[in-house]
Every structure is written in C-alpha cells, then in structure tokens.
Image (tube, rainbow, N blue to C red):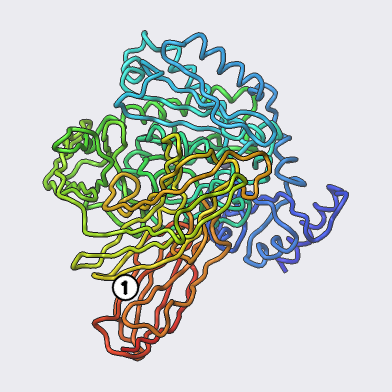
Amino acid sequence: MKLQRILALTTALLLLCGFQSLNASDAHLYRISLQGHGTAVELAQAGIDILAAIPNDHALAELSDEQMSRVIRLGYQVEYLAASLVAYSELDETDDYYSYASLVAQLQTWANQYANIAVLYDLATTVQNRHVYGMKISDNPLSEEDEIVNFFVGCHHGNEKISEEVPMYFLNYILSNYGTNPDVTFWVDNREIWVIPLVNPDGFFNNNRYNANNVDINRNYSFHWGQSASNYGPYPFSEVETQAVRNLNLAHHFTTAHSYHSYGEEILYPFAWAANHPSPDNPFFVEMTNAMAAYNGYTPMLSGNLYPHGGEMNDYLYGEKGVFGCTSEVWGGPGYNPPASQIAAVCQENLPTDLYQLQRSGGAQITGRITDATTGLPLVAQFKVVQLWNPNEIYPRYSEPTFGRYRHLLVPATYTLEVSKAGYATQTIPNLVVVANTPTVRDVALVFVGYPNIDIVLTPVNPPIVIPAGGGSFSYNVNIHNGESTSQSFAAWIMAELPSGTMLGPLLGPVNLTLASGATLLRTRNQSVPGSAPSGVYTYIGYVGAYPDAKYDSSYFNFTKSAADNGSSWVNDFANTGEPFEVDQMAQSPAQFALLRNFPNPFNASTTIRFQLPEASLVKLDVYDVSGRWVSTLVDGWREAGSHEVAFDGSNLASGVYIYYLTAGQFNASGKMVLMK
Ligand SMILES: [Zn+2]
C-alpha cells in the first residue's frame, strides 16, 4: 500500500518534470530519506553509488528505474530532485564563486605577491587542457627542508564548488598573516604547506562531479580500488588528477592531509572502504577529528560509516603511505553549495580545523632520523609502532630518503618502535613515552650486517649478441638460488646501462619472489631492443635484493647495438617477455583475479603456484593435504596488483595430493597438485 503510493508519487514527479527520454537505462537524481529508516551504508552495500549523505536525514544518489525500485523495495522513500546531478548542481547560485580562470589568476597573483614564501607549481594537464595547480608555502619555498608537510586539497568533485573556496580562503589567510601573526609565522617557518585548491578543474568547469573521462577521482586511488559502485576508472591512478596527488606525496611525504568536499557537515576519517572498519591508528584519528569538530560543530565519523567507498584519497594516503588525513564535508545543504551570503561563514568555520592540523602535526608523535651507523647517510627503512602495526590492514611505513625522517603521529601512551632494513640489524626500542603536545624524538643509526646468500646468474643464449640498426631481440637464462638455510623473500629486477652510462629500467621487475632453502629458479626470457636505441655497447644487469638500493647479488653480460637506426625500426621498445618469471610491473594489471595451475605438476620436491590480482588485495594462500589438514601458509598479507608466483617446497612432505587454496579480496579459488618422490 505504502510502497504503491511512493511509486505513484515518484512516477507523477517524473511526469511533471517532462524529460525528453525516459528509458530504463536513464538515471536521475533522487533524495532518499533516512529519517526513521535505513542508512546510506545499507544503500551502498546494495550497490547504490551514494553522492552525499547526512545520517538519519537523507542520502543523494542517481538512480536508474531498476535501482529506484530496488531502493523502494528496501523500504526507503525517494524524492525526485533533478534530471541529473549536473542539472541539480546548476541550481546552486555560484556566480560569486571563483571561476577556473579567476582562481588560476588569483593563485598567480599570490605567487608573485608572496614570492618569498609561496611557489606555484603546475602539477598536471587535464584531458580538456586545464591545469592542476599546487601552491607550496614555506620559508625557503624552493628548497626541500626537514620539516613537517601539511597537505590541503579541494574539489575532487567538480560540482562541489564551495570545496575550492575553503582552501582558497585558507591560502589567503596564511599568506596575508605571515610576519604579523606569530602562529602563522611559526607554521610557515617550520612547515611545508602544500595546497591544491582545485584538483578537478575539468569537472569544476563543467559543473560535474566527475572529470572529463567521467571518472570519480576520489574513487580512483589504489587502496581498495574498485570497491565502489561505479565511475572508479579503468585502473587505479588512471587519471592525471589522482596521479598529481600521488606524485606530490611521493616527492614530499605528507604528514597530514585535509580534503574538502560538500556537503553534510561531517569530518570523515579512515577507513572509507568498509563500514565499521576502524584503522590501526583509530585513537589518533578520533582525537584529531574530535578536536577539529570542536571548532565548527561538524560530526566526526568513520568515513565508511557514512557510506563505504573504495579508492578514496585519505584511505590511500594513510593505508599505503602513513599520512594522517581526513575529509571535511562542508556546508549543511540544501544543495551542494551555499548561497553567496554564506560562503564566508563556511570558509571561516573551517579555517581553525586547518590551523589545528598545522599545530597538531608538531605535537604528540614519535619521530627521528634513520641513518647508516657507519656512513651517517639517511636510510629508507621500515619503521613500525609495534602496538599499532597490522600488515593485514595497512602497508609498511618507510622513512623518507632525503633526511631519513620518519614520523608517526600518536595519542599519548607508551610505545615500542621497530626499525628494519634489508642487510641491517633490526632495532627494537621499547618504552617510548609519548606525551601531549611534544614530539618524542628518537634517532636510529642502523648497523650493516650483510645481505643473505641469494645468487643470481644471467647467461646470454648464443653470444655474442649484436642487435641490428632497426632493432631486434636476444634471449637469456636467469638462474636464482637461495643459499640460506631458511626460506627467503626478496625482489629480482633487471636494468640496462646504455653506452652513455645512463641506467635504463627496470626492464623487468622488481618482482617479489620467495624461495625455499636451497631452491633454484630457472627461467628463459627475451629482451627486445628498439631501433631507436643508440649504438654502442650495453651492459645488461640482473639484481636480487630489496629494490632498489639493497643489492644482494648481481650478474651481467654485454650486448652491442650495431648502429643507430636509419629511421625504419623493426622493433619499437624494450619489451621483456618469456617464461612467466613474474610480470613486468610496468605492464598493466590483469583484468581479473585468477589462480593459475602450479608448475611443474606432478613435482619433486618444489613447484610454483601463480596467481593474478587486478588490484592490490589482501591475499591468503594456504596448502592443505587431501584430508583437509593445513600444511602451510604461503602468502598472508597485502600484494600489489599484477601477477605473482610463490614457490612451494614439498621436500619434508610425503608423496600425495595437496590442495592449494587462494583468497584474494572477495575472490576464492583452489587447485590440486601432486607430489611424487
Ligand atoms: Zn565530494
């Protein structure tokens, strides 16, 4: 009865609005009531792509007719809002907002006016030939200093125009108060502040949530990518906008991040990819977002509890890179953008949350520099706050390369720090007391003790190798041996030194391998050399170790390119093919999950199991005997997208049938293998 009434109401509304086309595949914008019934989490889990939500009030989504009836069957009341999100966003009166042109002009004016503390960088050119600009504010803005890095970003979603106004207001506040306001002066002198006020200029220009490729760029980051309903892009970081954020962090190593969106008056912290799924650093995130919310009355919450969405920026920055970030959904609605009279108020209520991040990032934490005890040089080493470390949830954290700086923001308590690096003795430092407002500083000098005994030998087939002017290829054998008494995990990769001395590559890898004690891996590979490659003698080098700087062993041979290309190349690139040793990481990710047959099979006493991941995934690979008894776990943790192979050593097992069982994300598969001694 009630359901029929809603359907009738919706149909009436649809008719009233008089569309040109009304076929089943058309999606329109609806407001879904959450008053007294349901949650946006439930809707997202039912496959609805949520665009905005306020708990216990409403959610916004574009629904096809099929989706709308699904939502209604779940007991929700829906209200037609507009033909599309774009049409709805155009109802917002944003004439008094920055345009793309006026925003760029303002940034350039500031860069000239405050050249002593501000530099403007063009970080990316978009599909429609606009630019993603980032402004760095610091004393000595042209040099990379050993300082805390705070990142602020607006407008991942182009229709959320207020989300560029807020960081522009923040920029103006910092720039115009330097030298007069003591807090601002301190932060500029002791922080590196990076602001991308408008990360999606095409979407902004077109008043569209998505970029010009129709991708939701806040679903295009790699962490749990593809777990949203739609518009996450063909593969992680397929878009120049997300590449710009990724590359900026890889170069400068953010400490904190603050991403602006509208609307809902919420402050969202990781994880976003699942509901009711706090991160290992939840106590810190709760502390930070509660402190921010105290300034503006917004609601702090786990991002996934608003509605789960994969591939989100803060999940990526935190989950993969250890950056402590959150998202503010500014403005309470209705509509995505406040009227002109409210812009200043929305900017003002968010300013203190940015200033809080500048302050807090210098507060309670463990930090220091990791160096080589002999040379004193900075090291990129893994650091763990042991009490918070969970390899099933997050990626390893590393010190940055320029200063060896590591930093982990924490709530006050007592912690244990562990610092490790291949070839160095691990150091465990217990009883590190972290107190409020002050960093606990602990520098760590690691002692080099030598690398494990892993050998690599590259042997060319049919030497000497001479590549004709138009390009060609050669074959070679790779032999990798684990001479240690225990199983070893390491990387293998191949580089080429050009006649000029420049290093090219990796041409293969780095591929992650695990070899049982005494095991040997043999593969034949083919290497293409393009016609455009310069003439002269090349050195082709294989490495095993911890990529890129810890080289346990290497092996090389030479080849000659006979002459420079005369303009009619037979071969166009440095493709590396052959027996699946592991895939080239530069190759695109596989399209789907797959568990491949082990090889050889039957085997004695070692075999290799291969699997493919279209996205970075939490992987478990177990081996059982025929009666279902667990034998061993070969993989347990995060693996990158790509093809993977794992060696299985049956030398201590009886002959017979064994089952291997793979779970990767939502994917399950099993295979059978026969050990014959
Ligand atoms: Zn948004």
Coordinates of residue 470 in the picture (x, y in percent): 62, 46
Question: As rendered, which of 435 and 116 lies closer to the eye?
Answer: 116
State the residue position of label 1: 633
| Vertical comparison of 419 with 525: above or below | above
- For ligand 1, give the image quadrant: top right
Q: Is residue 511 above or below residue 281?
A: below
**Count of all numbered marks drawn on residues in the image:** 1
- The residue shown at (69%, 61%) is 67
Question: Up-down: is 207 above or below 452?
Answer: above
Q: Which of 414 and 262 is in front in this view?
A: 414
> What residue is rendered at 65% in x and 62% in y?
71
**570 relative to 441 in the view: left or right:** right
Report the front residue among 425 and 617.
425
Q: Which residue is drawn at 83% across and 47% down?
A: 17
Q: Is residue 43 left or right of residue 23?
A: left
Residue 134 shows in the view = yes
Neighbours of disc 1 within 10 Å: few (<14), some (14-19), many (20+): some
Secondary element under disc 1, as helix, strand or loop, is strand
Q: Nearer the viewer, residue 407 or 297?
A: 407
Residue at figure coordinates x 44%, y 64% from the top left: 581
| Residue 566: % across, % down | 65, 39
Left or right of 517 on screen, residue 497: right
Does the closest atom of ligand 1 sit within 8 Å of the Cβ of label 1? no
Q: Which amino acid does label 1 sit on?
A: Thr
Residue 174 relative to residue 331: left or right: left
> Vertical placement of 634 versus 76: above or below?
below
> Which quadrant is home to the N terminus?
bottom right
Q: For the C terminus, give its image quadrant.
A: bottom left
Residue 515 screen position, x and y as percent: 30, 67
Pinpoint residue 312: horizontal percent, then vertical percent.
50, 47
Q: Is residue 268 among the parts visible in the rendering?
A: no
